[in-house]
Amino acid sequence: MAYDQQLAERIRRYFSDRTDIVEKQMFGGLAFVVDGHMCVGTTDSRLMARVGPKHYQKALQEMYTTIMDFTGKPLKGFVYVEPEAISTDPALYRWIRHCENFVRSLPPKQS
């Protein structure tokens, strides 16, 4: 499993005061799970961002975003964010907040 260790650390810093975040190997990288739902993650040097179906097309219009298609089939509601778009913590944290807002709108997963 190859993922960007530095990006993972930056994401951990964002969630550092939280006890409800679970890290999981997922999508060939490292994912951060909120209420049982994948929120964000990293694979190679990109951020995996779960923006949701409503914001999917808008997210793809932003610079340095691409369709998340690690299996060859696009995952609706998920985008890759290239390093150029998340080079600062405020830029990264904006993406994480957006993803977290979407994930929090979902019903909690049943154990």
Image (cartoon, helix red, strand yellow):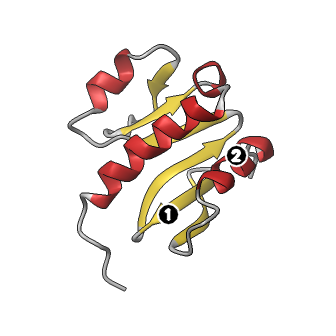
Q: Residue at x 65, y 25 (%)?
A: 83
Q: Are marks 2 and 1 in contact (CB under 8 Å)?
A: no
Quadrant housing residue 89: top right
Q: CA distance from mark 2 to mark 1?
A: 15 Å
Q: Residue at x 20, y 37 (%)?
A: 54
Secondary structure of the residue carrying numbered label 2:
helix
Residue 5 in the image, given as x and y percentages of width and height: 79, 47
The answer to whether residue 106 is above or below residue 65 is below
| Residue type beneath disc 1 | Val
- Which residue, given by chain and number where applicable, does mark 2 sit on? 10
Q: Earlier in the sequence, mark 2 or mark 1?
A: 2
Q: Nearer the viewer, residue 84 or 30?
A: 84
Residue 59 in the image, given as x and y percentages of width and height: 36, 26
> In the current view of this chain or complex, which residue is farthest to the bottom?
111
- Which residue, given by chain and number where applicable, does mark 1 sit on? 33
> In the current view of this chain or complex, which residue is farthest to the left?
54
In the rendered structure, the answer to whether residue 97 lies left or right of residue 29 reads: left
Figure disc tally: 2
